Amino acid sequence: MKMEKPEYHIFVCASFRAGGDPKGVCNKKGATDLLPYIENEILDRGLNAQITSTGCMKACDHGPVMVVYPMGHWYGGVESEDTVDEILDALEDGEVVDNLLIA
């Protein structure tokens, strides 16, 4: 069975480091707690997107971090469901949330 590639791929930093140690900022600020919410929002909105939690993305000063491909938008300060909604709303509208972008 061939897997269809999603239109969008959303990465959420889970801060996991060598040895499986969840030490980083994103994990401590609850990034992994947002994963089920993001997954449900993707389904509810009918977005053709896949979500993946990652190891440390080396952007700890901006954590929690979410990256959206294929655009390559790196968002920082993704600490709440409201922030996730703001990013997904922009994604649906083909826009960017400038105030959350990591330069």
Image: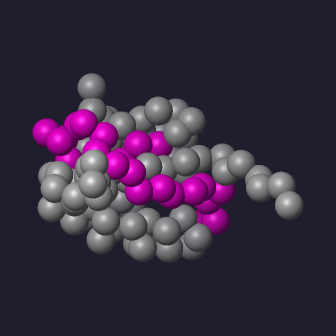
Q: Which quadrant of the view contains residue 42?
A: bottom right
Q: Is residue 77 above or below residue 21?
A: above
List x then y, in percent, for residue 73.
42, 35
Disc count in the image?
Answer: 0
- Viewer-proximal residue among 17 and 69: 17
Tell whether 22 sits left or right of 95. left
Tell whether 45 sits left or right of 90. right
Residue positioned 15% across, 61% down in the render: 28
Residue positioned 30% across, 35% down in the render: 101
Residue 77 visible in image: no
> Residue lying furthest top in this view?
103
Residue 66 visible in image: yes
List x then y, in percent, for residue 97.
35, 41
Tell whether 6 sits left or right of 98. right
Specify start and end residues of the magenta stretch as a single range: 45-68
Q: Which quadrant of the view contains residue 1?
A: bottom right
Residue 90 colored magenta? no
List x then y, in percent, for residue 93.
54, 47
Tell whether 87 sits left or right of 100. right
List x then y, in percent, for residue 92.
55, 51
